[in-house]
Image: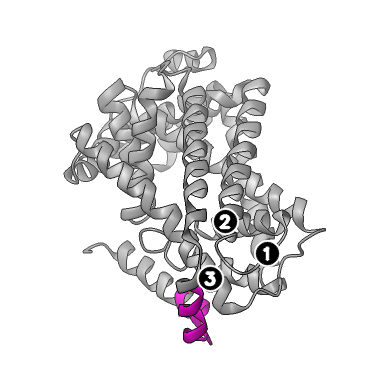
Amino acid sequence: MRSWKFWVGLAVSVLFLAIALRGLDLEHFWQTLREANYWWLVPGVAIYFVTVWVRTWRWRSMLEHLKPIPTARLFPIVVIGYMGNNVYPARMGEVLRSYVLRRNEGVPMSASLATVVLERLFDGLVMLLFVFATLPFAPLPDTYRWLVISFSALFGIALAVFMLLAARPAQMSRLYTLLVDQLAPVGVRPRLHGLFDRFIIGLQALRSPREMLTILLTTILIWLGETLKYWFVMHAFPFSVSFPVLMLMTAVVNLFTTIPSSPGYVGTFDAPGIAVLTQFKVPQPIATGYTLVLHVALWLPITLLGAYFMLRQSVNWGDMARAAHLKGAQAATPPAPASERDDVTNGVSL
């Protein structure tokens, strides 16, 4: 709570909640919650955990050039990371995930964080694919179109840069070295070099078209599975929209959760979800009840399971501070000589 990021995120969440709940008929809203058939959450939660397992398999394939790790060993680490995202601001659970991976498997944090960035990049690209695929069946509200265009540009540029880094690591390393040595203070150059070199190693999954296609297809499967959870939870409430509308809602709410907010994406998940549903003639009290219940059903089970795995693996809340410190300390390790950095093109770990 002493961090300015916490207070900025809290302000963003309050703003989005105010937008989401403006003009809400509270009596109808509470009636919707009382009459919902919550048994439909059971298959929804079950399919969600299937997608978490598929996410773990995807991460295993991205880590394979660093260290082969069975999916079963990675699953608790992934769940701990997602739990961390739900209770820490600024997606700090990703740092916690990489820290636990380093502690358990000895994988450098900078390299594993690069694979996490790739995950988020492919997630964002698939969300945009969902938007454009569903627009003919479920047109996006005009107020959100410019945000989708902005996200499209950002994710497209990021993917192009990452592919260039992965395809030409030695050349990019020499260019980066030149820029850092010219512009950065002498004292921080080793830290910047070390961070870049390990990050490049983590991007090596992008060097193979086959691996890129595998990541893309797996990511599409993951998000179709999550949309299926939206579909199951919808049956608990007195409304019905098509699957493409739920695909659009999945994409829009998850794109909006990239906006810094309070832990658990409060507000940034809810406001766009309610807006999409009301655009398709779902009454606001029902759309609000459904979106809030869906949010809790996405947040609570993975958080509880993550807390259980934290206890099982002797991870405590102080490990977050140690993870942030270790991330910086690893980046500060002096870089390898330029001749050794060229070995990155052959997949040699530094």
| Colouring scheme, one of rainbow, by chain, secondary structure, one colour | one colour
Residue pointed to by mark 3: 271
Q: Nearer the viewer, mark 3 or mark 1?
A: 1
Q: Position of residue 261 (x, y in %)?
A: 41, 63
Question: Position of 142 compared to 299: left or right?
Answer: right
Q: Is residue 143 above or below residue 188?
A: below
Q: Residue at x 46, y 34 (%)?
A: 114
Residue pointed to by mark 2: 255
What SS does tag 3 mark?
Answer: helix
Image quarter (top left, top right, bottom left or bottom right) of the C terminus? top left
Q: Is residue 127 above or below residue 271?
A: above
The kind of residue on which mark 2 rests is Leu
Which residues, given as a range, are shown in magenta? 17-32
User: Mark on residue 240?
Assistant: 1
Q: CA distance from mark 2 to mark 3?
A: 12 Å
Q: Residue at x 58, y 53 (%)?
A: 232
Of residues 304 and 255, the one nearer the viewer is 304
Please identify the dominant SS of the magenta region: helix
Q: Nearer the viewer, mark 2 or mark 3?
A: 3
Q: Earlier in the sequence, mark 3 or mark 1?
A: 1
Question: Position of 88 compared to 35: left or right?
Answer: left
Q: Is residue 281 above or below residue 195?
A: below
What is the crowding at mark 2: few (fewer than 14 residues within 10 Å), some, or many (at least 20)?
many
Can residue 92 be seen in the rendering of this structure? no
Q: CA distance from mark 3 to mark 1?
A: 19 Å
Q: Residue at x 63, y 60 (%)?
A: 249
Can residue 82 be seen in the rendering of this structure? yes
Question: Position of 177 compared to 190: left or right?
Answer: right
Q: CA distance from mark 1 to mark 2?
A: 23 Å
Check residue 234 for magenta coloring. no
- Quarter of the figure with residue 77: top left
Of residues 20 and 281, the one nearer the viewer is 281
